[in-house]
Structures are given as structure tokens and as C-alpha cells.
Amino acid sequence: MKIVITDAETVTSGDINLNVFSNLGELQIYDMTAKSQIDERIAEADILLCNKTPITAKNIEKAKNLKYIGLFATGFNNIDVDFAKQNRIVICNAPNYSTDAVAQLTFSYILNFYSRVSEYNSLVLNHEWINSKTFSYFPLPTFELSNKTLGIMGFGAIGKRVCRLAKAFNMNVLVCNRSKISEKNVKQVDFETLLEKSDIVSLHCPLNEQSKGIMNEQAFAKMKKGALFINTARGPLVDENALKNALESGKLVGVGLDVLTTEPMSKDCPLFGIKNCIITPHIAWAGLETRERLVKIVYENVEAFLNGKPKNQVF
């Protein structure tokens, strides 16, 4: 089997060795692959492994030997799944590898906004504590998480882990989810109630036609004044101009984003440089242990396919 990895640089900066896949077949690794290079590079591939490389019907049609597509990701919207299915190509993803990491980053935003750690560190570095008349210098208001209400949009593995962390801080939790949940001490509500009652709204739902742009002008208008908004799910869930307006008007006190509509960030992103908006470059999944777990899952997926027992198929 010829195995081609098209975008290794999205998975490793050299700290994880992808040559392990050579145990499973003849391996060709490309750091990154432009759209114009896809056809040539996967032409002879039996197995294609990628993270975000867009694989269209035309690409698949020209890859005459292609039998399997493995994703270094949970999402698979970069693949023409319907066409692959029609051509009996197996597609497998990597579910639940980043649950702890994404929940951790979610609470990094929350704790930073409520305790204002980075802002206080800046005050110290600017000599303000040195020049303070009192031993405790607190010009910036901070707040306890205890008894605050966290609204979780989407209650899959990540949403559930975020809920557990919230409970550890003695927070109240509201959940909006398409299917009924069975979690104790968690109240399931509709979307509007979640927006109206939450001090913090955090997105953990998938991107689809129903959820695209769900956080728009109307949604932000329904949120509490002074609420915090977090998105570690998918950028297109949010109307970025509406979010900018909600921040600049004072409707929201802060925003934490790990995802944007366009990635890498476009030069004209409306949220760039906006006060009280923290943006990280899609790093929630990128911890070393997280990526090691990811590669292990992808390896085991390929191994299972070669043994005639595919697992983690997306259809």
C-alpha cells in the first residue's frame, strides 16, 4: 500500500515522528500541499492521510488507486464524503482525542477574564505595584466563578468535560443540545434561555447548515449585558461583525476565540485588535500529548483498515 500524508506540518513541528506510518506501507510525507498539487501527489496513493487538505470529487476521481482516507482530525468537512462513499472509499476520523485539551483552553479564557491574570501581570511590569501605597493593589475588578452560570452549547464529549470543570468551580450549568441529556445537576434549556440566563456562553457544537452563523446580531442581543462569550468549536458558527458590535457596544465584557471564519486569520478580520477580545491561533488541540494521542488513533485506524476491520468510519 502506498501511503501519502499531504499536510504533515499541521500535525507536527518536528516534535512527533510521522515515519511510524512506514510500518504500514510505502510512505510519502509532504509538509504542505497546495490545491494545485493535490492531484499529482495523491495520484498513486492507496491510503491518503490528511488534516485540512481539501479533497474534492475531482481529486478523488483522479486518484484511481485510492481506497482509504484517514483524517488527523475529528471534523471531515474538507472531504467530499458523498463522492468518496459512491466510490467505496473508506473514510475514518479521530474522535475524542482533544477533549481534555479543548476544555482546558476554554477555562483558560474564563479564568483569565474573571481573575485578570495577564492584565495584573502587565500592571506589575509597569511598576504600578512598586508604586502602590498598599500591600494589595487591585484597581481592576475580579470576580468569583462560584454561583455564576455557564451556558454550554453542544453536549458532546468536550461539552461534558467543560461541564465537569464548571461544577468543580461550583458554577451553575445550562445546556442547549439537540438530543435529551441525562447529566445530573445540569439543566437543559432552549437556545434563547441559554443566551438570556448565562454569564458565560461557550460553544461546543458541530458546524452544519443549522448551526452556521447561529451567533448573530439577534443572538448576541439576547445575551446578558456584561456576559463573556467563548468559541473553541468552529469559526463559521459566529457572525464576526455581529460579535465585534456586541463587544464594542459593551454588551459583552469579553470574548475568547480559538477559531475564526477564515483560517489562518485574514488581514481584514473584523476582530483583530479589538479590546477585550483574546484570539489564539486554533491551538486548543495542539498540546504535545494531544497530538501524540491523535497520531496513535490515526495509526490504529489505518492498521484496522488493513486488517479488514475499519473503525471510526464517518459513514
Image: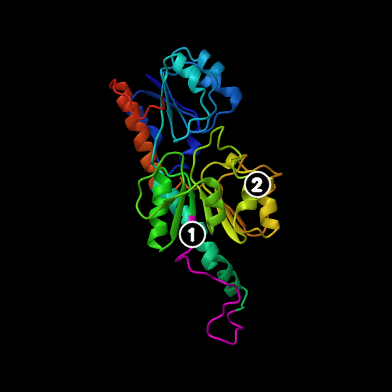
Count the marks. Answer: 2
Residue 166 image point, x, y percent: 42, 58
Check disc 1 and give the amino acid type. Thr
CB-based contact (under 8 Å), mark 1 and mark 2:
no
- Identified at 53% across, 46% down, the residue is 191
Viewport quadrant of the N terminus: top left
Name the residue carrying label 2: 218
Name the residue carrying label 1: 149
Residue 109 image point, x, y percent: 52, 57
Whether the magenta-drawn stretch holds residue 146 is answered as yes
**Disc 2 element:** helix
For disc 1, the neighbor class at 10 Å (few under 14, some 14 to 19, many from 20) is some
Numbered label attached to residue 188: none
Q: Nearer the viewer, residue 297 or 199?
A: 199
Check disc 2 and give the amino acid type. Gln
| Residue 34 seen in render | yes
**Disc 1 element:** strand
> Looking at the rendering, which quadrant does residue 212 occupy?
top right
Residue 96 image point, x, y percent: 38, 40
Q: Is residue 259 above or below residue 31?
A: below
Q: Nearer the viewer, residue 293 or 216?
A: 216
- Identified at 59% across, 28% down, the residue is 34
Q: Earlier in the sequence, mark 1 or mark 2?
A: 1
Residue 105 image point, x, y percent: 47, 53
For disc 2, the neighbor class at 10 Å (few under 14, some 14 to 19, many from 20) is few
| Residue 272 seen in render | no
Q: Is residue 140 above or below residue 218?
A: below
Whether the magenta-drawn stretch holds residue 152 is answered as no
Q: Residue furthest bottom?
A: 133
Q: Nearer the viewer, residue 205 or 288?
A: 205
Residues rendered magenta in the picture: 129-150
The chief SS type of the magenta part is: loop
